Image: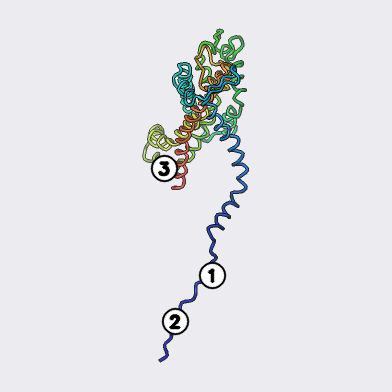
Amino acid sequence: MTDVITRADPKPDVPVVSPKGGAKDRWVRRAPLLPALIFAIVVTQVPFLVTIYLSTLDWNALRPGDRPFVFLDNYVTVLTDTRLQSALLNTVLLTAGAVIFSMILGLALAILLDRKFFGRGVVRTMLITPFLVMPIAAALLWKHALYNPAYGLINGIFGGSTDWVSSYPKAAVIATLVWQWTPFMMLILLAGLQSQSEDILEAARVDGAGAWKIFTHMTLPHMRQYLELGALLGSIYLVNTFDAVFTITQGGPGTATTNLPYEIYLTTFRKFEYGEASAAGVIVVILTIIVATFALRVISSLFRMEESR
């Protein structure tokens, strides 16, 4: 008997991509993005590094040529100065007030637009319009068209000659910010409402759940991450508010509405303390980065939730 030896067919030739070639391919794909990345680094990171350097100097423009290195003394001054502490408190109050009220109004408007009615598209476009107005234009509009004690719309409707900016400075600034940022919150919350499963809501109605129970036990828990996202993104933007404070109140009366961005402006262009202003700016950036980190986590969780569906 002849022994038959069966041999396996040789493996087909498979092109092996070397690590060097793979890295080259990745760089080829990323190359079109490099100009934008370089531009972003030059525009944002280089000035920030220069600001950090300036924050370590005792630099006052009224003392030209005298810029001694003081390391962290400017940061100690910023964190212990009562004027800057008051500006930090005003920043928290203005930001929190604007975010909370714009979230409440945004949720109410989102619930309205989540329903079908004639002219919904027109209403939605009109409600988004305030967010498209430039901040400085919005501040001028509210200061002169609404708050003016002589010809403002508010006194024209309710009578009297109340100087709203002088009497209620914080409320005047917050109302302007709420008017402009409510559409932003509304869009985020409307996206959350429209992502709800209609089948689950319909099943709840069939089981006898009323509108209020559906809203409190189903809609609000579903909207939690969207509410967090709106609050965090709104805080990132509103903590840097300068236009409304500068245009409407200029930080007054006294320091009633002086927030950190406006205080940095005063420190730079009124006191000419460039080192101290740079330290305050670095602190504001660090606080913003902390809030932005939480916002990115919420966004990541929303993406994971969408992928799991």
Between the C-alphas of marks 1 and 3, the distance is 54 Å
Q: Residue furthest top?
A: 160
The numbered mark, 2 or 1, whose residue comes first in the sequence reads: 2
Could you tell me which secondary element the residue under label 1 belongs to?
loop
Considering depth in this image, is 55 or 277 the residue closer to the camera?
55
Residue 304 locus on image (x, y percent): 45, 45
Q: Amino acid at mark 3?
A: Ile
Q: Amino acid at mark 2?
A: Thr
Could you tell me which secondary element the residue under label 2 belongs to?
loop
Q: Is residue 160 left or right of residue 79?
A: right
Residue 11 locus on image (x, y percent): 50, 72
Please determine whether, in this image, residue 80 is positioned above or below residue 1.
above
Say whether residue 114 is visible.
no
Considering depth in this image, is 64 or 100 the residue closer to the camera?
64
Say whether residue 72 is visible.
yes
Could you tell me which secondary element the residue under label 3 belongs to?
helix
Residue 274 locus on image (x, y percent): 56, 22
- The label on residue 109 is none
Please determine whether, in this image, residue 259 is positioned above or below residue 193.
above
Which residue matches tag 3? Answer: 200
- The label on residue 6 is 2
**Residue 251, image quadrant:** top right
Q: Nearer the viewer, mark 2 or mark 3?
A: 2
Which residue matches tag 1? Answer: 13
Between the C-alphas of marks 2 and 3, the distance is 62 Å
CB under 8 Å between callouts 2 and 3?
no
The numbered mark, 2 or 3, whose residue comes first in the sequence reads: 2
Identify which residue is drawn at 60% across, 22% down.
Answer: 138
Q: Is residue 160 left or right of residue 228?
A: right
Q: Amino acid at mark 1?
A: Asp
Considering depth in this image, is 25 or 197 the residue closer to the camera?
25
